[in-house]
Amino acid sequence: MYDVIVIGAGIAGLAAGHTLQSAGCRVLVLEARQRIGGRIWTDMCYGPVEFGAEFIHGHRAASWELVQQAGLPTSCWGRDRRFAIGGRMLAPDDPISTAVLQLYQQICCYRGPEVSVAELIERSTALPAVKQLVGRWLANLEGADLSRLSATALARERRLSTIGEDNFHIDCGYQRLLEPLSTNLTIELGTVVTLIRWNADQVEVMSADRRQWRARYLVVTVPVSLLQAGLPAFEPPLPTDKQTALAAIPMGHVTKLVLWFEQRFWSDFTVLSTDGVIATWWPVSSARTPTLMGYAGGQQAIRVAELGESEAIAVALRELQTLFAVEVKPYFLGGRLIDWSRDPWSRGAYTYSSAGTPAARVTLAMPLGPIHFAGEATVTGAEIATVHGAFESGRRAARAILLSRSF
């Protein structure tokens, strides 16, 4: 019998477990994967490269507390963004580049009736190439289907954010951020929770290998996509308001394509948005060997994933050869395609907001008897879909348990 069981050892689950254990609770964390971190996943093959979460967003993000606690080195990512059309990189002062930045800002500052981002872009009088680049930019950031992404909610989130606009890399790898939270926690890896039985007084958790645990409280941090699929199941079932809320929170798609090279062949750039198959490129400065990250979000992420790893790499190398006018294959060491939508324990990258999503997040975040919910999908402010938002949500759930505990 535990005081609290936490399902999921991503940063939300670890934050909840750490906070509760520090307060003297007997805590057990159950994780389906054979590693901690969830959608934080650092590869060390050629030095730190992020297969999952990449940046700390903003110089006032809550996760800086962990960075400072662990003494982790960081570097600031530049804000400059280049654009390419038809394999040709545009100059920063090219009229198309200027128009893309203007339309992007207009959408992020939108104030008006509920409308999708796709419709708002379509209303614009900008050139088709400008609309395409802006749409891809927003689809990448949000992982979203633009026909479902709410321009009203998107602009509201931008207005509410107070953490700053700069992005930062953890130079030694995002995974290191987890160390202050996971130390001394009891974590069972490779444990797939299939059923949660609950009443007003306690919960009983069952795993796929027929093990069982009981606790006074439960923190559920699994991605919303799994809850939508009924994983784990609840007995009795979740009430109608929770199920309705879950259905109103869309999960976004992201693919990341990591390419390692023996030698750098590209000119200086921070991030490059294109109209090619690979929507966005950036150099990975933390790796020990020259590395490029190819990124696609939303519907384009699905298209890249459908190519399969070998074809996606071949397409990417051809596009890089055109962009930089260099024969790149002689420098190529290897590559890796990461498709978060096919990861069985995430089934997507992170959530975004459709018309009814902001209210649904509030409903999902509310405790249900002894059950508390955390994770980026339960963030009700501006910091949705972020590591620091998930971190804060785990601490929020833990504090709620500590305020109401009966043990």
Image (spheres, rainbow, N blue to C red):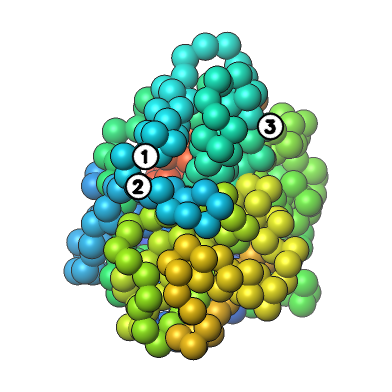
Residue at 79% x, 43% y: name it: 237
> Which residue is at 23% across, 64% downward?
74
Asked if marks 3 and 1 touch (Cβ < 8 Å), the reply is no
Q: Quadrant of residue 343?
A: bottom right
Residue at image position (52%, 57%) is: 87
Q: Secondary structure at mark 2?
A: loop
Mark 3 vs mark 1: which is more N-terminal? 1
The quadrant of the rendering that contains the N terminus is bottom right
Which marked residue is nearer to the observer: mark 3 or mark 2? 2
SS state under label 1? loop
Q: Please give the residue where the numbered disc 1 appears in the rendered image.
A: 94
- Residue 92 on image: x %, y %: 32, 44
Residue 147 in the image: state x and y as whole percent.
68, 32
Ranked by sequence position, the earlier of labels 3 and 2 is 2
> In this view of the protein, can residue 297 be seen by the observer?
yes
Alpha-carbon span between mark 3 and mark 2: 30 Å
Q: Are marks 1 and 2 in contact (CB under 8 Å)?
A: yes
Q: Nearer the viewer, residue 195 or 162?
A: 162
Left or right, 54 with respect to 310, comes to: left
Q: The residue under label 3 is which amino acid type? A: Ser
The answer to whether residue 213 of the structure is visible from this angle is: no
Task: Count neighbours of disc 2 (C-alpha within 10 A) and say few if under 14, some if 14 to 19, many if 20 or more.
Answer: few
Where residue 248 appears, as percent x and y from the top left, is 69, 33
Residue at mark 2? 91
Alpha carbons under labels 3 and 1: distance apart:
29 Å
Q: Residue 371 or 375: which is nearer the viewer?
A: 375
With 392 as the anchor, is 380 left or right in this view? right
Q: Which residue is mark 3?
A: 147
